[in-house]
Every structure is written in C-alpha cells, then in structure tokens.
Amino acid sequence: MPEIWFYHLQHQPLEKVLPSLVEKALDKGWRVVVQAAAEERLDALDDTLWTYADASFLAHGRARDGDAEMQPIYLTTGSENPNGARLRLFVEGADVAALLIAEPCDMYERMILLFDGADEDQLIAARMQWKTLKGQGHTLAYWQQGERGGWEKKA
Amino acid sequence: MKLSLDPAMQGALAEDSKRQEWFETVYSKAQEDPARVPWANLSAHPLTEAFVKTQVRGIDGLRVLDIGCGLGDNAECFAAEGAQVTAFDFVAQAVEWAKRRFPQTKVAYRQADLFALPEEWRGQFDLVHECYTLQAISVALIPQALGILRDLLAPDGKLLIVARARAEDEEVSGPPWPLPPSVFDIAKAQGLEPVVIEDIAATERIGRRHWRAVLKRAG
Ligand SMILES: C[S@@+](CC[C@H](N)C(=O)[O-])C[C@H]1O[C@@H](n2cnc3c(N)ncnc32)[C@H](O)[C@@H]1O
C-alpha cells in the first residue's frame, strides 16, 4: 500500500508547488497522475505545467489528448492510472479515501493530498480525509510548508 | 509523402556532411578503450532506460530499431525487456565492438548508413530509438533524417528521441548540436506528430537539458 502524505499549503499557491513536486518524482523515474475534483481545475493546471518556467515545461496529457499510456504526467478527475504512475497527487478536494476503496492501489509508492490552508472547505475536507484514512489503518504523514517554501514533517 | 529511403535521394548527399570519417576515426583511435569514445558510458542512457521501465504494457515482443547504436548499451536495454531489437551504426568497428561486448546477445547488430537503409526495413518497426545521433549529424540533414525515421515506423509505430536540448536562439558550437524546439516543427513537416515531448531540465543525474520525445506517424 502507498504511503499517504498531506501537504498543507501556506506560503505558496498550488501552481508553484505542483511543478516542483512533479519534477522530483520524474527525476526518480516515477510517473505521476494528478487528480482534481473538477475539470475547470484541470484546465488551469494544464496551463501551469506548460508555462511554469521560461526555459522548460512539463509534458502532460489528459484523456482527450489520447496516448494516455505514454504520458509522464496525466491529469484527470477520474480514478484511472493509464500511465502506470507511482505517485498520485490529489488537489482541491479530490477524494483519496474513495479512490483507495474503488481501485487497486499497490502500484503507487506514494499519494499526496495537497490542500490550501487559507481555504476553509479544503481544510475541513483534509481533516476528514485524515480521520477516515487513519481509521482504515493507512500510513500517514503531515507536512507543513515553512516560510521559505521548504517542507517540514509535523506528524 | 516523399519516399526518403529512395536511393536516388541518397546519391544527392555529400559524403562528408554525414561525418562518417570523423566517427570512424573516433572508434579506431579508441583502440578498444571505451574511455576514449566520448559518448560511451557502458550503460543505457538513463532517459532511455527509464522509458523502457515505465511502459505500462511493457515492450516485450516489440520490433525495435536502434539507430547509430554505438557500443550497443541502449539496444541491449530494449532486448533485456524482451523486445526484438535490430541495431545499426555506419561505423563497422563500432558494430564489431558491440558484438564482442555482448557475445550472447539477442540483438541483430549490423553495419548500415541511416541514409542508405535496406528497403525491406520500411514500415517494419514498432519503436525506433535514437539517442544522440540526430544531434551528431549536420543540421542540413535533419529533415531528411527525420523523414527516413518516419518511413521506418509501422503504422502504429513510435519514434523515441533522446537528445540534448537548447533554446532556439542559443548559440551552439557543435558537434554535437543540441536540438532546438523547432526540430519538432521539422518533424511535423516530415509526417511525425508529437505524442509526448518532455523538456527535461538538467539535474544531478542528467547534467544538461534534454529532450525525450515520442513521435508517431501523422494521419
Ligand atoms: C554520439 S554517438 C551515440 C551512440 C549511441 N546512440 C549512444 O547513445 O551511446 C552517434 C553514433 O551514430 C553513428 N552515426 C552517425 N551518423 C550515422 C549514420 N548516418 N548512419 C549510421 N550511424 C550513424 C555514429 O557512428 C555514432 O556511433
């Protein structure tokens, strides 16, 4: 079973944090799925990944692009893992617990739920996820972002 | 689509623009010492290896062609995962050396020139792999080379490119000539559509900016 990390965003928006997380995973040889709760969110992430740095971009695809099994990074609102990702990121309310029940998850090394501390809904949802997953006996860790953007493990 | 494997077209090539003599000299001066072949790491390229390892359906049984195979490590990496691999280089010494390094190999190594390939290879490969060969040939030959690579692909075949990358306006003093983004426009004009183009920033493991791109036949 994958380890499940909670990332509490405080000093940087998702658009800043996501590319660096994804880059680190790719560098490890892991592919990535990013799961969001809504298609509009994916549109915004789509843009972010193409434009986050002047000199480079992160190649990614969605179901409508085809060739999903070739994508290093796959964006979805669904539960599929067509590219054999080892890391799955959950953003803005995407439900980790529901996925773990619905799908076999042995191929993942890690799942990370990212939530924005300034957004009350996301905060509440993350707390509920934590409780549910803890109750199901998963290995959880909680990371908070320091002022300089680094991550500290708090639980 | 023009038939770029057409022998009439190959005749038009100035011999030295292919830099064959230069490559022959590198391999012969090396006298069996891989340390003297600048690109010979004696292991598969990490970006190629990671590609092979992350294919969801695996590559078992795929017909793979490795172009400009050098000492064979990339070809062996595909073969180790069950692909049926053909690998060629236009330097005979490189090919012989690769065969000696892998006496038990399942790879079919042979000497061949990218610009004069056997006609029967046309449309025969599920995956054509090039690592650092496009960046080693003269810029003027790139469109033709891409057209040839396209012609080698089976209808659902893919071309995997692993090459050093540069910004469009960055000065280069090759060889090698790292590939600018516009190489993918040239590929498009030669009937190769992008499936994934990865722009990989320099990391500790991979010292410089690279492209890892998968292209497929258009249409
Ligand atoms: C920079 S080396 C890379 C070798 C190998 N692919 C690797 O990654 O280690 C380029 C290789 O392509 C071969 N080559 C260059 N032009 C070629 C051509 N027109 N036909 C066949 N081989 C060629 C050279 O002899 C050389 O071995």
Image (tube, grey):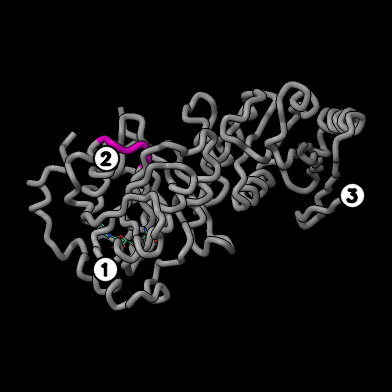
Residue at position x 49%, y 62% in the image? B208
Q: Secondary structure at mark 3?
A: loop
**Which one is in front, B83 or A37?**
B83
* Region in magenta: B123-127
Question: Is A100 drawn above or below residue B75 in the view shown?
Answer: above
Ligand 1 is found in the corner quadrant, namely bottom left
Provide the major secondary structure of the magenta segment: strand
Q: Which residue is mark 2?
A: B152
Q: Are marks 3 and 1 in contact (CB under 8 Å)?
A: no
Residue B114, horizontal then vertical, whole percent: 23, 52
Mark 1 vs ligand 1: CB below 8 Å: yes
Name the kind of residue labelled 3 in the image: Lys
Which corner quadrant holds the N terminus of chain B? Answer: top left
Q: Are marks 3 and 2 in contact (CB under 8 Å)?
A: no
Q: Which residue is mark 3?
A: A154
Q: Which residue is mark 1?
A: B23
Query: What is the quadrant of residue A13 in the picture?
Result: top right
**Chain designation of label 2:** B
Residue at position x 85%, y 40% in the image? A139
Residue at position x 50%, y 36% in the image? A70
Which corner quadrant holds the C terminus of chain B? Answer: top left
State whether discs 1 and 2 lie on one chain. Answer: yes
In the displayed structure, does residue A133 sit left or right of residue B50?
right
Q: Which mark is residue B187?
A: none
**Chain designation of label 1:** B
